[in-house]
């Protein structure tokens, strides 16, 4: 890191983009030394233990130094970029971009003394890319040479080692100076970074010129030359025991960080802190499935996504209202049970960055159409990788839908700080005794895990039985309301 002496140079520090987070990893720099930036312009993307967010700069000026290269984990409060706000001319840009840590010391000015007041930077986290007049230096083709692409990438793309040379595909020309950065969602940018793909060389096929995951994979496939498959007949006998489709490296190591690291720590802490108990019930949900189809045709739900999860969520909310003590948390320090008089309903979502559990605030107070709207927004935001840290805080009870993977049931682990989690299995036709006769009915299995310190067997059983009863006879949503 170089040192800066000009009084006009401002140091932008890594902010706390969530509540109580201590560090974040720099995923991507969108500017380089010499670029002009404006107030509110996004300069980098960072990943915390909860989400990936873009950071806007809070002032105008010229970038003088990037203190850390991409892939570096930086503590909150540490300066990450220096900007000359004095109106000086931009520093001359080198011909090719290189990490800030590897740039010669003469390429950056000296660091100014820290300004008084080390409070949090006024960053508007989560804002989209602001239009700006950023000037970028010319780029020279792809960042990663073809011969440096790894065999692991080939295996991921094809499912086996390539057997024939891949024909080169046309590449998009490098972005000229003065153009905006390529359009791509954060998960796609992360994928491109992991695979070593320069997004400026990728031909977009998405709407409005957005680069998709398929575009990134296609770029890698076009750049990786196929290696000839070894002949099994000519190979030594000791080598023929290994299938030709397997990579000889045998293993792939993936760093545990970001969302996955936080999830792992939280699940271990929950599993070995709260004594888990799981109960199961299999229920006929044929009437619920019929109601789902009727609601889809109801004008009150026009434009909303109506599915079984909506009625399962509503059933759980009614069961909590009938058994409010289940909606609680354990305060170890105070040795108290804290009963919540509101429900922030968490929905476990699998994303490219790992499992996250955003929650619907005050779900108990929402009508069925309002709940449908909130569920739709939650799922859409999670899939786009735009879930904010605030959306994942303050949950009181969670639903995890393992049925979407064709799984019958499971024993879910509590989300830390919560007392119960409901797992929903696959809904499928099964033989069932209905009105004295065996008939095919739509059946599912529910599993409720709860913290046995504050939820005893009776309370947990009542909650699970109420949910099952509502799904079997959904008219109870009215009679029990």
Image (cartoon, grey):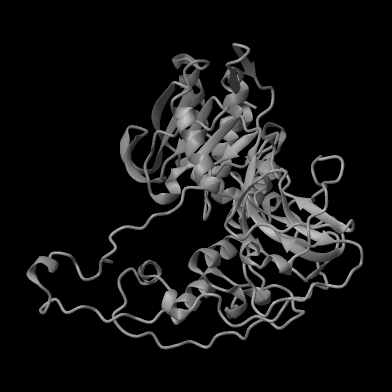
Image coordinates of residue 55 in percent, x first then y, are 73, 55
Residue 53 vs 206, above or below: the answer is: above
Q: Residue at x 26, y 66 (%)?
A: 248
Q: Quadrant of residue 181?
A: bottom right
Give the side of residue 2 with respect to residue 401, left or right. Answer: right
Q: Residue at x 33, y 68 (%)?
A: 159
- For this orientation, the residue located farthest to the right is 87
Which one is in front, 395 or 312?
395
Q: Residue at x 65, y 30 (%)?
A: 343
Q: Residue at x 48, y 29 (%)?
A: 269
Which one is in front, 209 or 315?
209
Residue 345 vs 212, above or below: the answer is: above
- For this orientation, the residue located farthest to the top is 335
Name the quarter where the N terminus is drawn: bottom right
Residue 96 vs 467, above or below: the answer is: below
Q: Quadrant of residue 168?
A: bottom left
Give the side of residue 82 with respect to residue 232, left or right. Answer: right
- For this orientation, the residue located farthest to the front is 106
Image coordinates of residue 410 in percent, x first then y, are 39, 37
Image coordinates of residue 52 in percent, x first then y, are 63, 53
Q: Is residue 305 visible?
A: no
Q: Is residue 338 visible?
A: yes
Q: How many marks?
A: 0
Q: Quadrant of residue 151?
A: bottom left
Name the quarter where the C terminus is drawn: top right
Which one is in front, 411 or 236?
236
- For this orientation, the residue located farthest to the left is 237
Image coordinates of residue 382 in percent, x first then y, are 60, 52
């Amino acid at each position: 890191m170089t040192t800066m002496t000009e009084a006009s140079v401002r140091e932008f520090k890594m902010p706390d983009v969530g509540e109580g987070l201590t560090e974040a990893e720099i995923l991507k720099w969108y500017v380089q030394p010499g670029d002009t930036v404006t107030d509110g312009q996004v300069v980098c993307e960072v990943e915390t233990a909860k989400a990936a967010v873009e950071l806007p700069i809070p002032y105008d000026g010229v970038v003088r130094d990037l203190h850390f290269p991409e892939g570096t984990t930086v503590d909150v409060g540490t300066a990450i970029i220096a900007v000359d706000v004095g109106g000086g001319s931009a520093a001359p840009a080198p011909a090719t971009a290189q990490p800030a840590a590897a740039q010669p010391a003469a390429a950056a000015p000296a660091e100014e003394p820290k300004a008084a007041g080390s409070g949090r930077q006024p960053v508007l986290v989560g804002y989209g890319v602001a239009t700006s007049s950023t000037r970028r230096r010319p780029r020279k083709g792809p960042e990663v040479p073809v011969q440096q692409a790894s065999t692991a990438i080939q295996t991921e793309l094809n499912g086996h080692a390539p057997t024939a040379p891949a024909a080169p595909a046309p590449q998009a020309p490098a972005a000229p100076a003065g153009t905006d950065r390529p359009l791509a969602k954060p998960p796609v940018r992360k994928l491109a970074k992991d695979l070593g793909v320069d997004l400026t060389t990728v031909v977009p096929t998405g709407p409005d010129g957005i680069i998709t995951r398929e575009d990134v994979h296609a770029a890698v496939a076009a750049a990786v030359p196929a290696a000839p498959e070894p002949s099994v007949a000519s190979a030594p006998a000791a080598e023929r025991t290994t299938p030709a489709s397997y990579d000889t490296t045998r293993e792939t190591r993936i760093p545990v960080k970001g969302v996955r690291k936080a999830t792992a720590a939280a699940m271990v802490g929950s599993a070995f802190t709260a004594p888990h108990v799981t109960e199961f019930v299999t229920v006929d949900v044929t009437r619920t499935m019929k109601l789902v189809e009727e609601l889809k045709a109801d004008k009150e739900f026009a434009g909303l996504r109506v599915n079984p999860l909506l009625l399962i969520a509503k059933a759980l909310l009614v069961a909590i209202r009938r058994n409010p003590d289940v909606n609680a948390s354990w305060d170890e320090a105070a040795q108290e049970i804290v009963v919540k008089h509101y429900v922030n309903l968490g929905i476990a979502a699998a994303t490219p960055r790992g499992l996250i559990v955003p929650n619907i605030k005050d779900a108990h107070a929402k009508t069925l159409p309002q709940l449908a709207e909130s569920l739709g927004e939650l799922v859409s935001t999670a899939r786009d990788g735009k879930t904010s840290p605030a959306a994942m805080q303050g949950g009181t009870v969670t639903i995890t839908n393992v049925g979407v993977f064709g799984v019958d049931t499971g024993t879910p682990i509590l989300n830390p700080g919560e007392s119960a989690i409901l797992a929903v299995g696959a809904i499928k036709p099964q033989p069932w005794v209905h009105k004295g006769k065996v008939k095919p009915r739509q059946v599912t299995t529910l599993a409720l895990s709860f913290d046995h310190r504050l939820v005893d067997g009776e309370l947990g059983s009542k909650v699970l039985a109420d949910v099952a009863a509502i799904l079997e006879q959904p008219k109870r949503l009215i009679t029990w309301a």
